[in-house]
């Protein structure tokens, strides 16, 4: 339940105070009214639709300034990984994944990673340069997305802006993650999906980002 103050417009009709109007104008619309009552000093909502309360809580931790910081850290991470990505063919599992992506070899057995192979194959079709490097860039793209989504998740969880920024910057240049963000591996795709899913399940921060 939530009560919000309203003033009388002189004709017996409830009109939201400017602060309440500003509050909901950030959401783009007003919530569904369940009941309106008269109280000393003005009108009030007896109850507000839970969906809008959820959106309100989401915006409280991820505002537009945070959205631009998400873009900033994502771009910074991609610039770092793009400039240090493996330039050509690798050996071991990396080379095997590169070959599967180029040949578009999809299979349903364990360890075949068909989703990653499908995405990597699209990179070989639409990007230029060394074909093995194009496959490696898949890890760079999803590594950068992971960094941006992690910042959004930390803000959603209530961490201060500066602390969230320092955390993701440290994560971005950590040895293991950086290593897997510049070679043909499935880990950054897995991490991006994991962080995205965690954010959606916790409070739906993705729905607070303009355009989603």
Image (cartoon, grey):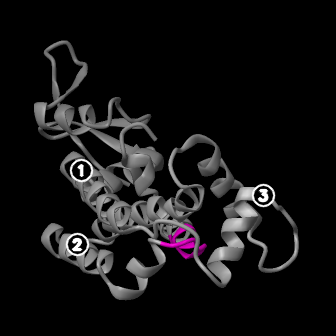
Residue 4 sits in quarter: top left
Q: Identify which residue, 50 or 40, lies in the foreground.
A: 50
Cα separation between marks 3 and 2: 40 Å
Q: Mark 2 points at which residue?
A: 164
Q: Identify which residue, 40 or 32, lies in the foreground.
A: 32
Cα separation between marks 3 and 1: 43 Å
Residue 40 sits in quarter: top left
x, y (%) of residue 118? 72, 55
x, y (%) of residue 69? 22, 55
Lower sequence index among marks 3 and 1: 1
Cα separation between marks 2 and 1: 14 Å
- Label 1: few (<14), some or many (≥20) within 10 Å? some
Q: Name the residue under label 1.
A: 63
Lower sequence index among marks 3 and 2: 3
Give the residues in magenta: 183-191
Apparent side of residue 93 relative to residue 171 in the rendered image (left or right): right
Q: Name the residue under label 3.
A: 103
* SS label for mark 2: helix
Q: In this view, does 20 lie above or below 170?
A: above
Lower sequence index among marks 2 and 1: 1
Residue drawn at 71 percent across, 75 percent down: 96
x, y (%) of residue 47? 40, 46
Residue drawn at 25 percent across, 19 percent down: 13
């Amino acid at each position: 339940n939530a009560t919000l103050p309203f003033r009388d417009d002189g004709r017996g009709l409830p009109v939201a105070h400017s602060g309440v109007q500003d509050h909901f104008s950030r959401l783009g619309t007003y919530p569904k009214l369940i009941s309106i009552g008269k109280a000393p000093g003005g009108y009030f909502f007896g109850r507000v639709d839970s969906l809008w309360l959820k959106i309100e809580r989401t915006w409280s931790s991820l505002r537009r300034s945070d959205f631009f910081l998400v873009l900033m850290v994502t771009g910074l991470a991609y610039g770092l990984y793009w400039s240090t990505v493996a330039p050509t063919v690798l050996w071991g599992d990396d080379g095997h994944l590169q070959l599967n992506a180029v040949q578009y070899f999809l299979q349903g057995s364990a360890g075949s990673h068909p989703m990653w192979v499908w995405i990597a194959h699209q990179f070989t079709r639409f990007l230029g340069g060394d074909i093995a490097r194009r496959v490696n860039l898949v890890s760079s793209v999803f590594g950068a997305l992971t960094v941006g989504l992690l910042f959004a998740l930390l803000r959603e969880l209530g961490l201060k802006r500066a602390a969230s920024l320092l955390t993701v910057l440290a994560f971005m240049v950590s040895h293991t993650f950086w290593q897997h963000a510049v070679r043909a591996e499935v880990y950054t795709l897995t991490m991006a999906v994991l962080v995205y899913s965690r954010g959606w399940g916790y409070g739906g921060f993705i729905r607070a980002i303009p355009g989603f």
